[in-house]
Image: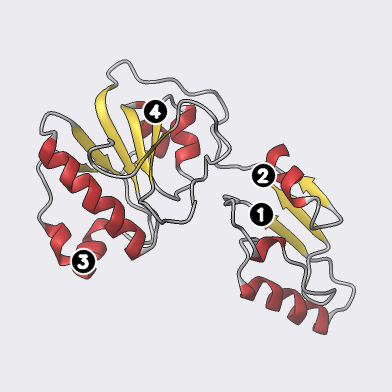
């Protein structure tokens, strides 16, 4: 199973073992490990715990080895096979990558809409999560229907293509930021005062900027 700290993952292990006790239960930690991650690091006992944890890379393996007896680096198949570089026509464009949660989308969109009105010469390329396209979000959050003209919706291009066209990435908790950084887009993490740290790039010491308001951006 995928391994993100959800209760259903442990129930799946228990159910499988109740049918076949010798089943091998493998957990694939395929996404971001936030600084406050708890469920993915908490042993619950043999019936509910994975036999093996696969992880995306050496950094996460080092963080998980204290919690699980067998951790194997498996990698991430979402990473580009070759290094990416900014496109020749990259310009002062901002890629916005919301998560698939309505509340998180609304927070990032409110900031983006405000920035777009203040910076009419800058294009904001909004790439919404497949589980929550903009049309659905706008029905849930009606105020977002008043979209500034310089906020453009990504239209079918790949994440790598979108990232290569942009100088910056505006994000909160989306793991898409990894690919945008590989494409050369500078990360701007939006964290309001009092917010928990959900930055996928939290260990990054330089180049990334943490912003708390439109003024900061």
Disc 4 residue crowd, few under 14, some 14–19, many 20+, Cα 10 Å: many
Give the residue at x 25% y 29%. 93
Identify whether 165 is placed above or below 16: above
Q: Label 4 belongs to which residue? A: 185
Mark 2 or 3, nearer chain start: 2
Element type where label 3 sits in the image: loop
Mark 4 or 1, nearer chain start: 1
Label 3, label 1: how far apart the Cα atoms are: 32 Å
Element type where label 2 sits in the image: loop
Where's residue 39, x and y in %?
Answer: 65, 66
Mark 2 or 1, nearer chain start: 1
Residue 29's label in the rendered image is 1
Side (left or right) of 20 relative to 76: right
Which of the 4 quarters of the picture holds residue 99? bottom left
> Residue 117: in sight, yes or no?
yes
Name the image quarter holding the C terminus.
top left
Mark 3 or 1, nearer chain start: 1
Quick one: which residue is furthest to the front in this view?
194
Q: Label 3 belongs to which residue? A: 141
Quick one: which residue is furthest to the right in this view?
22
State if disc 1 and disc 2 touch (CB < 8 Å): yes
Q: Nearer the viewer, residue 161 or 200?
A: 200
Mark 3 or 4, nearer chain start: 3
Disc 1 residue crowd, few under 14, some 14–19, many 20+, Cα 10 Å: many
Where's residue 66, x and y in %?
Answer: 81, 53
Label 4, label 1: how far apart the Cα atoms are: 25 Å
Q: Label 2 belongs to which residue? A: 56
Disc 3 residue crowd, few under 14, some 14–19, many 20+, Cα 10 Å: some
């Amino acid at each position: 199973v995928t391994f993100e700290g959800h209760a259903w993952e442990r129930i799946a292990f228990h159910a499988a073992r109740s049918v076949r006790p010798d089943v091998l239960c493998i957990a694939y930690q395929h996404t971001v490990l936030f600084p406050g991650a708890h469920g993915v690091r908490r042993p619950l006992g043999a019936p509910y715990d994975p036999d093996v944890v696969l992880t995306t890379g050496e950094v996460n393996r080092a963080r998980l080895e204290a919690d699980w007896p067998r951790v194997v680096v498996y990698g991430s198949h979402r990473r580009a096979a070759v290094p990416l570089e900014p496109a020749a026509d990259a310009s002062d464009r901002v890629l916005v990558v919301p998560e698939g949660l309505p509340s998180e989308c609304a927070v990032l969109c409110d900031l983006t809409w405000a920035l777009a009105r203040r910076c009419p010469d800058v294009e904001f390329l909004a790439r919404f999560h497949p589980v929550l396209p903009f049309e659905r979000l706008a029905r849930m959050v009606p105020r977002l229907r008043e979209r500034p003209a310089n906020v453009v919706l990504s239209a079918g291009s790949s994440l790598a293509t979108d990232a290569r066209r942009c100088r910056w990435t505006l994000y909160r908790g989306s793991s898409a930021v990894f690919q945008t950084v590989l494409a050369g887009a500078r990360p701007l993490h939006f964290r309001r005062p009092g917010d928990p740290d959900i930055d996928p790039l939290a260990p990054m010491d330089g180049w990334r900027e943490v912003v708390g308001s439109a003024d900061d951006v």
